[in-house]
Image: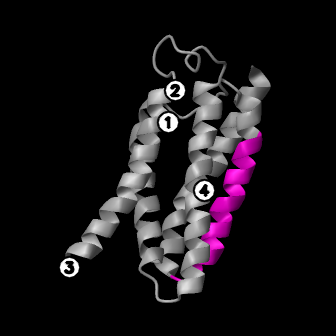
Amino acid sequence: MKPKWLSLTIFFALCFVLAGWGGLMAETGPGSWYDGLQKPRFSPPAWIFGPAWSLLYILIGVSGWLVWRGRDVTERRIALLFWGVQLLLHLIWFLLFFAFHLPGTALLESLLLWFFIGAFIIAAVKVSRRAALLFLPYWAWITLIAFFNLNIWWLN
């Protein structure tokens, strides 16, 4: 029983450690570069980002873990490759946007991230339908974030 929960903890750790590392490298908060940007009218309130990302990181971790526990080794490896790539691309987007202040480059990179999230969902459904379904809110959120990113780039 321990290895099952230990492996889930590892998936959570991967998600939250990368998110934390990205957060340490970024400049956010009152008076920051991001705070000074012109934002579209439909901007989500700042308080929503913390809870939304926390929930999404939990879903991302559980989804990866469910795939890792799958039976078909080949399908599992393909899905986990996409899972890992999208996680890395998410970190890169965060750094491009918040640490390096490159919203245009981050926008282009978000398209690549969006593609790899979709690729994971397609690959994951062959291993665990639940894992694929758990990724849908993340894909929707990244779609919204990419649109938000586009508007920030356009306005600034």
Disc 4 packing (10 Å; few <14; some 14–19; many ≥20): many
Amino acid identity at mark 1: Gly
Where disc 4 sits, the SS reads: helix
First in sequence: mark 3 vs mark 4: 3
**Quarter holding residue 99:** top right
- As measured in the structure, the alpha-carbon distance from the residue carrying label 2 to the one carrying label 1 is 6 Å
User: Residue visible at 48% across and 73% down?
Assistant: 131
Amino acid identity at mark 2: Ala
First in sequence: mark 2 vs mark 4: 2
Circle 2 residue: 26
User: Residue visible at 64% across and 31% down?
Assistant: 97
Circle 4 residue: 86
Disc 1 packing (10 Å; few <14; some 14–19; many ≥20): many
First in sequence: mark 1 vs mark 3: 3
Left or right side of 142 for 11:
left
Amino acid identity at mark 4: Gln
* Residue 113: % across, % down: 67, 52
Circle 1 residue: 22
Q: Are marks 2 and 1 in contact (CB under 8 Å)?
A: yes
The magenta stretch is 108-127
* Residue 155: % across, % down: 76, 22
Where disc 3 sits, the SS reads: loop
- As measured in the structure, the alpha-carbon distance from the residue carrying label 1 to the one carrying label 3 is 32 Å
Secondary structure that dominates the magenta span: helix
Left or right side of 49 for 37:
right
Circle 3 residue: 1
